[in-house]
Image (cartoon, rainbow, N blue to C red):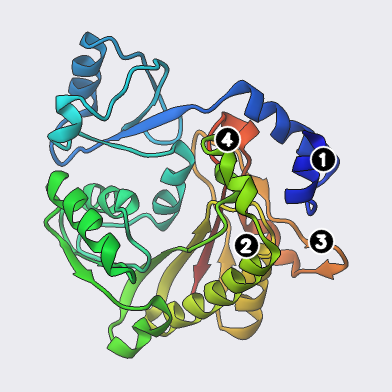
Amino acid sequence: MIEFFEKNFFYLENSILLKLQESLKKGYQRAIRTNTLKIESSKLKEKLEKKGFLLEEVPWFRDAFFVKSEKSLGKTLEHFLGYFFAQDASSLLPVLVLDPKPGEIILDLCAAPGAKTTQMAQMMKNQGIIFANEPKRKRIAILKGNLQRCAVLNTVLTNFDGRLFFKTGLKFDKILIDAPCSGSGTFISNPSILLSLEEGLIKKLVHLQKTILNSAFSCLKKGGTIVYSTCSLDPRENEEVIDWAIKKLPLKIEEIRIKGINFHPGILGYQGKTFSSEIRKCARIYPFDYQTEGFFVCKLSF
């Protein structure tokens, strides 16, 4: 097993590799987020516990719960009614860092299937405007269905290549880039992902990520915020992209502090490459921290 992890996570320290292996043995913590546009968390918890589900509040988001029971949530009436969204607990973080407010104009550049879009809408109380962009037409239907199920009313759906979105001429207060990535941090919930981490794919993704981030900057209002995130652990998709961005664009990395969760700082280099010391302000979550998927988050201000 160690050889398998070394092959896929060669850029991490041995101590981290060992902890990643242990996290896979311990298993994955499922989570759900209450859709407060339809129901209060206390009422949802009561309904689901009556059906035999054991729920424990996620420390960094009061309207989310770890699901401790093995029963399926997908077939419950509460799911069909849009009372909750099944969402990994660490994937709540990008929107928490973005901190969307009622009345703001926000771009979710890579929106499907809609977990983060619906999270933004509930934090905005359905006020303001979210442009939920999904470049793949086949995924628009999934996004649309989730927005309707969750009673999201403040969202406009768009179908642009994120690399070219700047051509719309639209400007935003805040932009979320939950970038297309290798997904290497999701191995705890989907171990088969480790079989698809090819070198050629990573290089293509890095180019795509940089181009999308460059496009997003052109859509940002002065004084605005971009949050860049991936569910990858690879520094090439994360710290290297951000290091490129702050050297090419007039963007500044901001400190990230979220109550209830501890982050690992960004990696300052790997295999002879050295990044700006500012990269330390980026935030990493490893699967062994909370038995969730791994995530990388960076907050950039203009």
Q: Quadrant of residue 279?
A: bottom right
Mark 1 / mark 4, whichever is N-terminal: 1
Q: CA distance from mark 1 to mark 2?
A: 24 Å
The image shows residue 137 at horizontal and vertical percentages of 27, 69
Amino acid type of the residue tagged 1 in the rendering: Glu
**CB atoms at circles 4 and 3 under 8 Å apart?**
no
Mark 1 vs mark 2: in front: 1
Q: CA distance from mark 1 to mark 4?
A: 17 Å
Q: Which residue is mark 3?
A: 270
Q: CA distance from mark 3 to mark 2?
A: 12 Å
Amino acid type of the residue tagged 4 in the rendering: Ile
Q: Which residue is mark 1?
A: 3
Q: CA distance from mark 4 to mark 3?
A: 24 Å
The image shows residue 168 at horizontal and vertical percentages of 28, 87
Mark 4 / mark 3, whichever is N-terminal: 4
What element does badge 4 sit on?
A: helix
Residue 84 lies, with reference to residue 284, above or below; the image says: above
Amino acid type of the residue tagged 2 in the rendering: Asn
